[in-house]
Image: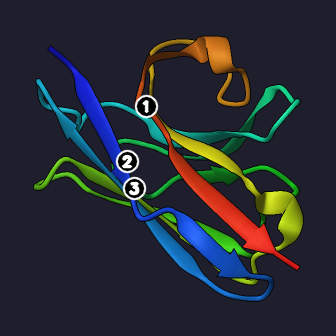
């Protein structure tokens, strides 16, 4: 079955960088748009970034644009999220997702979710 496994989270200070990775298995994901969502304590899950099948199209929320970069390696079935200039408000559990149908910004548009990896940014 489809499995998404995130890694790379941790505790960092404001201004630091982190690289999250997502390993996808169970089938070929090279034709799927993939992405990242996050959920902070007490808040709804929110869209972070998405990347189309070729990697040529990338989409970001306004809150991370210019600081985060999403990429993929279709040969390895992996997706990465490089997060620079981290802020305390970036603290959240980050989820790797596979897009199925609908607008990229809606969580209902994604049919597969990983278990998440915790990112904590201290001030």
Label 1, label 3: how far apart the Cα atoms are: 23 Å
Looking at the rendered image, the disc whose residue lies closer to the viewer, 3 or 2, is 2
Q: Which residue is mark 1?
A: 115
- Which of the 4 image quarters holds residue 4? top left
Q: Quadrant of the C terminus?
A: bottom right
Disc marking residue 6: 2
Question: Which one is earlier in the sequence, the residue at label 1 or at label 3?
Answer: 3
Q: Is residue 114 left or right of residue 37?
A: left
Residues at circles 2 and 1 in contact by the CB criterion of under 8 Å:
yes
Circle 2: element type:
strand
For mark 2, does the 10 Å Cα neighbourhood hold few (<14), some (14 to 19), or many (20 or more) residues?
A: many
Secondary structure found at label 3: loop
Question: Alpha carbon of mark 3 to alpha carbon of mark 2: how far?
Answer: 19 Å
In this rendering, position of residue 14 left or right of residue 47:
right
Q: Residue at x 59, y 15 (%)?
A: 109
Q: Tell me: residue 14, above or below residue 74.
A: below
Residue 119 in the image: state x and y as whole percent: 62, 59
The label shown at residue 55 is: 3
Numbered disc 1: secondary structure = loop
As measured in the structure, the alpha-carbon distance from the residue carrying label 2 to the one carrying label 1 is 7 Å
Relative height, residue 12 to residue 77 (above, below):
below
């Amino acid at each position: 079955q489809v499995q998404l496994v995130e890694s790379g989270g941790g505790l960092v200070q404001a201004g630091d960088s982190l690289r999250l990775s997502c390993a996808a298995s169970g089938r070929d994901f090279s034709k799927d748009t993939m992405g990242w969502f996050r959920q902070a304590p007490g808040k709804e899950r929110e869209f972070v970034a998405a990347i189309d099948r070729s990697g040529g199209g990338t989409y970001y929320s306004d809150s991370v644009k210019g600081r985060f970069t999403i990429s993929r390696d279709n040969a390895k079935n992996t997706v990465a999220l490089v997060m620079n200039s981290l802020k305390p408000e970036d603290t959240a559990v980050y989820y790797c997702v596979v897009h199925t149908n609908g607008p990229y910004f809606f969580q209902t548009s994604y049919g597969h979710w990983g278990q998440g990896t915790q990112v904590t940014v201290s001030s």
